[in-house]
Amino acid sequence: MNSVRSAYERTIAQDTGRVLGNAETVCKLRLARRWVLALAKPSSEEVARTNLERQGYGVYYPRLLQRMVYRGRETARIIPLFPGYLFVQLDTAKQTSAPVRSTLGIVDLVRFGSEPASVPDSIVEDLRARADAETGLHRLNACALERGAAVSVGSGVFAGLDGVFEREVGEQRVIVLLSLLGRETAVRIPSDSIRRSVAV
């Protein structure tokens, strides 16, 4: 009876050890992977991303769909959400940061002192969650403006004019009251062409 009990206890101990060992391994793997911020050369974010991925690094390059008016026609272009920066994931158990610094398109890593600055996983996860699920692109909403807020138009045919925010109409357009020809006129313009006016 005692021998059976001893064998049972040994089995339980072995299983417990395996579970704890697996948990410790997962924890170590998570700690081994960390995000750092890389500074890219001007207009070289895409080149840097391609070359980093070829070397086996995880890269997150958040981009923004920007709508604008060019020569009277509405168009859209894709631009970096954070111009000049990319998030690079290092597996410190297998990789070092040295090759990142010598990668084509990269200037250096952002540092605090002599060490590369770590970016919390939660920041990258939050950015990814805010991006469009289909395209992976970020979009600007109506700037969180309330009705009656003073705004200025930064692009398009009404660039340079000040007005009053009226309301959103659709995902990417808003109605703004502008003073045209001596009277207040409601115009519909892209939401990313306006900014809240700053009181001087």
Image (cartoon, rainbow, N blue to C red):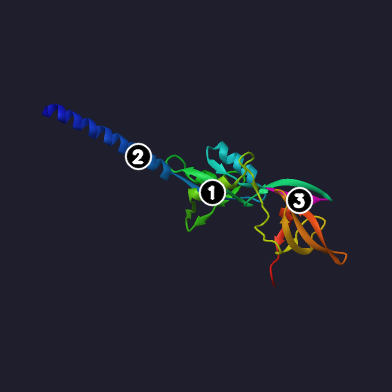
**Percent x, y of residue 80:** 65, 49
According to the image, label 3 marks what residue?
A: 68
Disc 2 to disc 3, C-alpha distance: 50 Å
Q: Which one is nearer the viewer's eye here, 32 or 77?
A: 77
- For mark 2, what is the residue? 23
| Residue 54, quarter of picture | top right
Number of numbered callouts drawn: 3
Drawn side of residue 2 relative to residue 21, left or right = left
Badge 2 or badge 3: first in the primary sequence: 2
Tag 2: amino acid: Ala
Q: Dot 2 surroundings within 10 Å: few (below 14), some, or many (20 or more)?
A: few
Kind of residue sitting beneath label 1: Asp
> Which residue: 66% across, 57% down?
143
| SS category of the residue bearing label 2 | helix
Which residue matches tag 1? 126
The magenta stretch spans which residues? 65-71
Which disc, if any, is residue 179? none
Depth check, front residue: 57 or 152:
152
**Local secondary structure at mark 3:** strand
- The quadrant in which the C terminus is found is bottom right
Amino acid type, label 3: Met
Which residue sits at x=38%, y=42%? 28
